[in-house]
Image: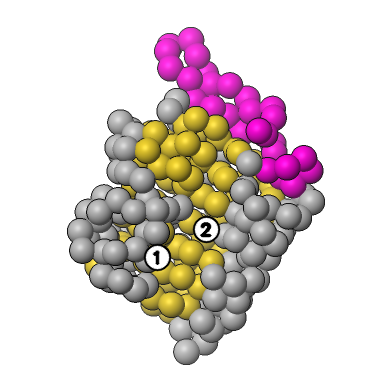
């Protein structure tokens, strides 16, 4: 139903009072209509999952707003086919803000914005608590006018190979990343964009030590 809100009880902390368990072999939610809001829910994996996104959205999900949610993979069996929030079509004006994505192994992206147009990702955190996470946030073919701002990609006993991954990106200046930070064990903060596909401003790699305030990211590999 277009225009509905799917929400748990509002909670200011990461431990949400309303949880949704991951489905065994399918998405927990498929958003296929416009102007849906998803808020204050924790999507929790389970060991029987065989590979799916917790939530996906189609090209018809224009105006989707996901905020104050947690996507937690840690109880699931590691699989790159398990994703958090996943685009399956070219939706427009999708906003994701104040969400937390937690991984402890070789899972798929916490957030995939492939083909999304006029997207905004703001004030989110991506936490690696173990294992190796290949890509925390992905954009891809036809992602355009996507702004990623004030997001944090942190490794706590884990590794993130690419914080923001642009494999398959096709649009010149299609992604803009600013005010994001990347932990010590994030191999490359912003990776796999060809020349001119991603604009960057004031993004930092974390440093370790009392005199190390981090390193400004000045190039994309």
Which residue carries the number 2 mark? 112
Q: Position of residue 20 (x, y in %)?
A: 27, 69
Q: Position of residue 123 (x, y in %)?
A: 50, 49
Q: Is 43 included in the stretch rendered in magenta?
A: no
The Cα–Cα distance between marks 2 and 1, rounded to whole angstroms, is: 10 Å
Which residue carries the number 1 mark? 53
Question: What residue is at 30 percent from the left and 31 percent from the top?
Answer: 157
Considering the whole magenta stretch, tell me its main secondary structure: loop
Q: Residue at the bottom extreme? A: 1
Label 2: state its secondary structure.
strand
Question: What residue is at 40 percent from the left and 65 percent from the top?
Answer: 53
In the figure, is residue 220 to the left or right of 188?
A: right
The span shown in magenta is 193-221
Q: Can the viewer see residue 18?
A: no
What is the crowding at mark 1: few (fewer than 14 residues within 10 Å), some, or many (at least 20)? many
Query: How many discs mark residues in the rendered view?
Result: 2
Q: Quadrant location of residue 77?
A: bottom left
Q: Is 203 included in the stretch rendered in magenta?
A: yes
Question: Disc 2, disc 1: CB below 8 Å?
Answer: yes
Q: Is residue 114 above or below residue 122?
A: below
Q: Quadrant location of residue 174?
A: bottom right
**Rendered-image quadrant of the C terminus:** top right
Q: Nearer the viewer, residue 20 or 110?
A: 110
Q: Position of residue 190 (x, y in %)?
A: 60, 38
Question: What residue is at 51 percent from the left and 50 percent from the top?
Answer: 137
Q: Nearer the viewer, residue 128 or 195?
A: 195
Q: Nearer the viewer, residue 102 or 36?
A: 102
In the figure, is residue 143 to the left or right of 4?
A: right
Question: What residue is at 30 percent from the left and 37 percent from the top?
Answer: 130
Label 1: state its secondary structure.
strand
Q: Position of residue 102 (x, y in %)?
A: 34, 48
């Amino acid at each position: 139903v277009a225009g509905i809100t799917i929400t748990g009880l509002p909670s200011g902390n990461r431990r949400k009072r309303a949880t949704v368990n991951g489905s065994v072999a399918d998405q927990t939610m498929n958003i296929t209509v416009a102007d849906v809001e998803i808020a204050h829910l924790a999507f929790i994996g389970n060991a029987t999952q065989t590979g799916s996104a917790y939530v996906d959205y189609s090209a018809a999900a224009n105006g989707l707003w996901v905020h104050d949610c947690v996507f937690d993979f840690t109880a699931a069996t590691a699989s790159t086919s398990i994703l958090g929030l996943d685009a399956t079509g070219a939706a427009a004006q999708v906003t994701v803000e104040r969400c937390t994505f937690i991984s402890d192994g070789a899972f798929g992206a916490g957030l995939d914005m492939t083909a999304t147009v006029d997207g905004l990702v703001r004030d989110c955190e991506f936490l690696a608590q173990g294992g190796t996470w290949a890509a925390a946030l992905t954009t891809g073919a036809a992602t355009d006018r996507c702004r990623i701002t004030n997001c944090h990609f942190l490794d706590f006993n884990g590794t993130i190979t690419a914080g923001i991954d642009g494999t398959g990106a096709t649009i010149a200046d299609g992604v803009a990343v600013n005010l994001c930070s990347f932990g010590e064990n994030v191999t490359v903060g912003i990776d796999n964009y060809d020349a001119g596909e991603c604009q960057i401003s004031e993004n930092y790699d974390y440093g370790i030590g009392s005199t190390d305030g981090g390193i400004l990211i000045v190039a994309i590999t």
